[in-house]
């Protein structure tokens, strides 16, 4: 297994191209199940999770063709075509590797009247149940059966009638499944307290480009008027706001000055607000967002929340940055109950962090030191890379398959701005 070797201390400076958003791509790809016509997605990131999802789509009889991907380019174009769905079963072996597989439930149900998907199982960052995915589909008229580790959703004869659902907590995944199920329902469906993350807006925009009728896009109340059929489309995946935020933290912790090319400030509000509070200069430029660190980092009190609040996917990276701030910071995680797995590893690099329940107290230290570390999830792994960039000496980041799931060619992008980082085979 590969690992990353990072020798800290280099100030990052230059331009990092931001890739297409993983979390958006993983909900745009299953939209191909909703139409017989081709769906072409541009700016898809080259990531292990996208390859996995492509494989899952092939399982249902969807053909996929990838074009225009020179090795030196970031991103790629994929055309997916599903004239006929040959299977509506998502088997355990594919689902267990990728939680996002649950996102095929809504569109398969909408297109074929039935879908069987393996339960995704536990996850390192908490229990992550799918009860809300099932409840909203039930509210739209589906019958749900659970047996032998699988969930089966069945629509009545003639298709889903549609219905109304008020989410008790904001769920990104359940909102996505609901949208993809409702667009082909017979009637109008309404969602209240729906997630309104930019990735949900991206999904709505694609569905509208395919002929869906959705009101309230960008708000937490959505009305979806079902249509008989959707058509093909060509669509560009939004920029990855979490990748951009991660590199912003990397630049900041090294005292650097980096242009995040393609990043959209309007989709990164809470992260940029947090960075400014920490003392980072953030400027919106024509081609992206520039972050520059001039002077000491200030401590901050940060709490994750559904959008437009601070993304849980940014918590670990911001924590790394705050380990070297000039004072004590408090970070509270409200979305997942077990999302501080980076803390023991950051402590091994010299950080002073104590955790009590969902709150972490971070006392800034003068200097982190390099160490061999490993993490158990994607964003936690990125937080270790960020810390390593500022640490004295060499760090080794192991289990980088987590990073490969969510960061397109991380080491190449960091090399572009002067980081001393290399990928080596594990011994
Ligand atoms: C969540 C994050 C998303 C992030 C992703 C990966 C939020 C609101 N969502 O999305 O920003 O990109 O993780 O880290 O910040 N829940 C249930 N039942 C369900 C579904 C969810 O109780 O059926 C709970 C979850 O346990 C969690 C909360 O709802 O506490 C939000 O989960 P959800 O948004 O569905 O998770 P993801 O879609 O994975």
Image: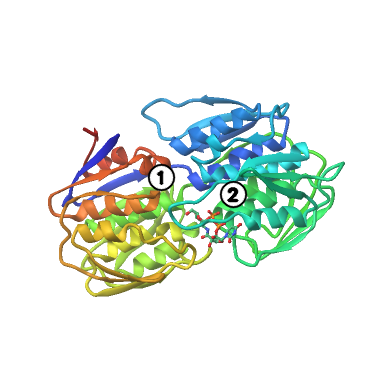
Residue designated by label 1:
18
Q: Which percent across, then down, holds residue 357?
A: 40, 71
Q: Which residue carries the number 2 mark?
A: 202
Please tell me how many numbered marks the rendered image carries: 2
Q: Quadrant of residue 198?
A: bottom right
Disc 2 packing (10 Å; few <14; some 14–19; many ≥20)? many
In this view, 51 is above or below 363:
above
Q: Closer to the camera, 307 or 49?
A: 49
Q: Nearer the viewer, residue 323 or 212?
A: 323
Q: CA distance from mark 1 to mark 2?
A: 16 Å
Q: Residues within 10 Å of mark 1 (few under 14, many from 20)?
A: many
- Is residue 45 among what the camera can see? no
Q: Is the N terminus in the top left, top right, bottom left or bottom right quadrant?
A: top left
Q: Residue at x 65, y 54 (%)?
A: 133
Name the residue at 15% across, 66% down: 366
Residue at the far left in the pictured view: 393
Which quarter of the frame holds ligand 1?
Answer: bottom right
Counting from the top left corner in percent of width and height, residue 92 is at: 56, 38
In the rendered structure, find residue 204 and report the number of the disc placed on it: none
Residue 90 at x, y percent in the picture: 62, 36
Residue 186's spot in the image, x, y percent? Answer: 84, 48
Q: Is residue 351 left or right of residue 403?
A: left
Q: In the image, is 266 to the left or to the right of 387?
A: right
Earlier-in-chain disc, 1 versus 2 = 1
Residue 372 in view in this figure: yes
| CB within 8 Å, label 1 to label 2 | no
């Amino acid at each position: 297994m590969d690992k990353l070797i990072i020798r800290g201390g280099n100030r990052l400076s230059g331009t990092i191209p931001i890739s297409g958003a993983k979390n958006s791509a993983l909900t745009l790809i299953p939209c191909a199940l909703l139409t017989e016509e081709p769906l072409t997605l541009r700016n898809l990131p080259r990531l292990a999770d996208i390859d996995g999802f492509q494989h899952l789509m092939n399982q249902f009889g969807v053909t996929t063709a990838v074009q225009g991907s020179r090795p030196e380019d970031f991103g790629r174009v994929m055309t997916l075509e599903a004239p006929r769905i040959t299977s509506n079963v998502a088997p355990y072996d594919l689902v267990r590797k990728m939680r996002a597989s649950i996102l095929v439930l809504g569109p398969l149900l909408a297109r074929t009247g039935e879908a069987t998907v393996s339960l995704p199982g536990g996850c390192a960052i908490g229990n992550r149940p799918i009860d809300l995915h099932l409840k909203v589909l039930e509210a739209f008229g589906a019958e749900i059966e659970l047996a032998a580790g699988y969930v089966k959703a069945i629509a009545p004869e003639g298709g889903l009638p549609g219905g109304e659902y008020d989410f008790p907590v904001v769920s990104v995944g359940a909102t996505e499944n609901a949208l993809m199920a409702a667009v082909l329902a017979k009637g109008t469906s309404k969602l209240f307290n729906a997630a309104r993350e930019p990735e949900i807006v991206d999904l709505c925009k694609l569905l509208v480009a395919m002929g869906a009728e959705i009101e309230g896009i960008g708000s937490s109340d959505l009305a979806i008027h079902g249509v008989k059929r959707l058509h093909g489309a060509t669509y560009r995946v939004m920029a990855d706001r979490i990748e951009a935020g991660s590199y912003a933290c990397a630049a900041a912790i090294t005292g650097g000055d980096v242009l995040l090319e393609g990043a959209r400030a309007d989709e990164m509000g809470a992260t940029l607000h947090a960075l400014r509070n920490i003392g980072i200069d953030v400027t919106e430029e024509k081609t992206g967002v520039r972050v520059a660190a001039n002077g000491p980092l200030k401590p901050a009190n940060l709490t994750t929340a559904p959008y437009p609040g601070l993304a849980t996917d940014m918590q670990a990276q911001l924590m790394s940055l705050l380990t070297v701030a000039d004072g004590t910071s408090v970070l509270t995680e409200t979305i997942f109950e077990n999302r501080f797995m980076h803390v023991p590893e950051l402590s091994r690099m010299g950080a002073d962090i104590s955790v009590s329940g969902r709150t972490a107290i971070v006392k800034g230290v003068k200097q982190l030191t390099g160490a061999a570390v490993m993490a158990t999830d994607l964003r936690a792994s990125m937080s270790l890379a960020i810390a390593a960039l500022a640490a004295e000496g060499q760090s080794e980041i192991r289990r980088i398959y987590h990073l490969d799931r969510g960061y397109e060619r991380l080491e190449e992008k960091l090399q572009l701005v002067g980081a001393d980082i290399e990928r080596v085979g594990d011994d």
